[in-house]
Image: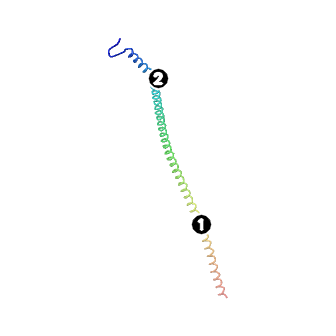
Amino acid sequence: MTLPLNINWQQILLHMFNLVLLFGGLYLLLYKPVKKFMDDREEKYKRMDDEANEKLARASAAEEEIAEKTRRAEEQIARDIAEAKREAENEAENIIKDAKNVKKQMIIDAEDAATREKNRIINDAREEIAELAVKAAEKVLSEKTSAAGDADA
């Protein structure tokens, strides 16, 4: 049976079957493996992105923790410095008080030593004056005695 325009249904069906076989083979041999490769690759990059985001989140958390520790350390250092400053001021006040006490004691000791020295000098001067007075009296007496003895003679 011939159809107009020389159409052979058997040939058409055979070509359609070949086309279906070609598409099936291409689907199984090319599309499916390429699709699987692309899906695996997409999953790999998604997993890498998730890991990177997780690492970034951990790094951010670690950075915040370090910033907090740094802040606390700086606060502790400031407190330690303030405490050391207070202790130094207290120590300086104690040293100044001790120095003032030593100064007062040195002044008292110096005044006592000066008073003793003054008294010693006054006593020495009195003794010297007494000696000079005795010598002067002896001289006067000896002159009077010699004058009286010359007058008698």
| SS assignment at label 1 | helix
**Residue matched to label 2:** 29
**Circles 2 and 1: CB distance less than 8 Å?**
no
Left or right, 60 with respect to 118, comes to: left
Mark 2 nearby-residue class (10 Å; few <14, some 14–19, many ≥20): few
146 and 41: which is toward the camera:
41
**The quadrant where residue 3 appears:** top left
Q: Quadrant of the N terminus?
A: top left
| SS assignment at label 2 | helix
Q: Quadrant of the C terminus?
A: bottom right
**The quadrant where residue 39 appears:** top left
Mark 2–mark 1 Cα distance, whole angstroms, equals: 127 Å
Look at 59% across and 66% down and name the residue there.
117
Look at 46% across and 23% down and name the residue there.
29
The amino acid pointed to by label 2 is: Leu
Residue 51: x %, y % from top left: 48, 32
Q: Is 77 rendered above or below residue 35?
A: below
The amino acid pointed to by label 1 is: Glu
Q: In this figure, what is the number of numbered marks?
A: 2
**Residue matched to label 1:** 117
